[in-house]
Amino acid sequence: MIRVRSAVAEDAPAIARVHVRSWQSGYRGLMDQGILDAMSIDDRAARWVSILQEPHPLTIDTLVAEIEDEVLGWVSFGAGRDEGADADGEVYGIYSDPGVWSRGTGYALLNAAEATLVAAGHQAAFLWVLDGNERADRFYARNGWDEDGATKVDERPDMTLREHRRVKHLR
C-alpha cells in the first residue's frame, strides 16, 4: 500500500535517488546524455537537505510516497513562482522511481498535492513539462491537467530546457 507523508531532511538521500534515476530514465533522448550520466545522487542529496531544511518561501510542502518504508516518489509544490501567478498553485516537481512507473505512486502524490493546494486556498494550479516527454504528458492528461499553449525556455548553466505548461482547475 502506498503511504504519502511530508518529507523530512532524513529523506534527502532517497529523494535524490528517485530524482536522479527518474531523470536518467525519463529524459533519455530528450536531454544531453552526458548531463544525465554525470548526475550524482550524493550531490543531489546535499541539495535536497538544503531544500527541505530551508524551503523556498512559496513552497507549501514536499511529499514522499512510500511502500514498506521505502521512498519511491516525491512531489514538491506551493504557490506559483511565475510572475503574476502566485494566486495559482504550482507543482514544482513530481517524480517516481522508474521501477514503479504506472503503479499508482505518481497518482497518489499528485492527488495529495492537489488536495493540499485546495486546502491552502488555491483554485487552480499549473506545472511545466519538458517538451517531448510524452509519458508525462499522458499521465497529466489522464489526471485532468490540460495544455494551455504557454511555453518557456529554462536556461540553466549546463543545459537549456524547453517546456510547455499544463493547468488544472482544482475546485
Image: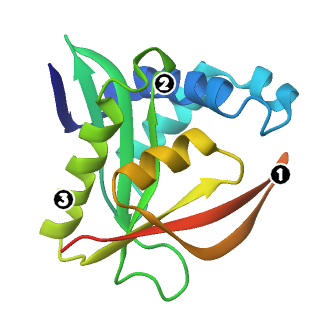
Mark 2 or 1: the one toward you? 2
Q: Position of residue 17 (x, y in %)?
A: 51, 20
Mark 3 or 1: the one toward you? 3
Q: Secondary structure under badge 3? A: helix
- Residue picked out by circle 2: 18
Q: Position of residue 86 (x, y in %)?
A: 40, 81
> In which image quadrant can residue 150 be found?
bottom right
- Residue picked out by circle 3: 116
Q: Amino acid at mark 3?
A: Thr
- Between the residue at mark 2 and the residue at mark 3, the CA separation in whole angstroms equals 22 Å
Q: Position of residue 164 (x, y in %)?
A: 64, 64
Which of the two discs, 3 and 1, labels the residue nearer the N terminus? Answer: 3
- Between the residue at mark 2 and the residue at mark 1, the CA separation in whole angstroms equals 22 Å
Image check: 154 left or right of 79? right
Residue drawn 71% across the image and 25% down it: 39
Bin the neighbour count of mark 3 within 10 Å (Cα to Cα): few under 14, some 14-19, many 20 and up: some
Image check: 151 left or right of 77? right
Q: Which mark is residue 157?
A: 1
Q: Position of residue 122 (x, y in %)?
A: 24, 76
Q: Amino acid at mark 1?
A: Pro
Image check: 56 left or right of 65? right
Q: Are marks 2 and 3 in contact (CB under 8 Å)?
A: no
